[in-house]
Amino acid sequence: QLVESGGGLVQPGGSLRLSCLAPGTDIRLSAMGWVRQAPGKGFERVAAISASGDKTAYADSVKGRFTISRDNAKNTPFLQMNRLKTEDTCMYYCARVIYGPTWSATADRGQGTQVTVS
């Protein structure tokens, strides 16, 4: 089970930090990522991080503004979002990912946390 937190309402240019808790699940050996979905649209990949944390990948739309990290001691990945734009308004989901030359989210994801930039 994955549980996201940290979403909310923020003005353009503001920041939020999302967290992903995994109670009862050891995700330290899993590559993790964040995807988002706007109403009526499909999922969009946002960022991913390898299990060891030494590799990261970002969507072009968030590169330079968002930072994905993980604290394996706390079994928790994070997504730091800076310089938020109105188009970042979405439901954000934490997910296990398959990480290779590119990456894709698996169906193992949480219930999401809403980010509204307005």
Image: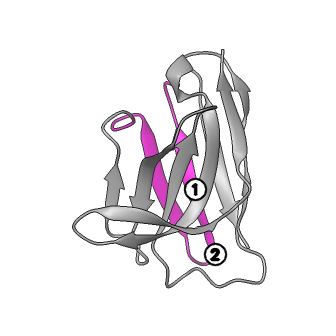
The kind of residue tagged 2 is Asn
Q: Is residue 43 left or right of residue 98?
A: right
Q: Which residue is mark 1?
A: 78
What's the residue at 51%, 22% (across, down)?
Answer: 87
Residue 60 in percent (x, y) is at 30, 37
What's the residue at 34%, 60% (across, down)?
Answer: 56
Classify mark 2: helix, strand or loop. Answer: loop
Residue 112 in percent (x, y) is at 70, 50
Q: Which residues are magenta?
A: 62-83
Is residue 109 in sight in this rendering?
A: yes
Q: What separation in Å lies between label 1 and label 2 (alpha carbons)?
A: 10 Å
Query: Is 104 one of the magenta-colored residues?
Result: no
Q: Is residue 44 left or right of residue 40?
A: left
In the foreground, 58 or 109: 109
Q: Which residue is mark 2?
A: 75
In the foreground, 33 or 71: 33
Residue 94 — which label? Answer: none
Query: Is 69 one of the magenta-colored residues?
Result: yes
User: In the rendered image, which quarter contains the C terminus?
Assistant: top right
Q: Is residue 18 above or below residue 87?
A: below
Q: Is residue 41 left or right of residue 62?
A: right
Residue 89 in percent (x, y) is at 60, 28
Crowding near the residue tagged with mark 2, few <14, some 14–19, many ≥20 C-alpha atoms within 10 Å: some
Is residue 85 in sight in this rendering?
A: no
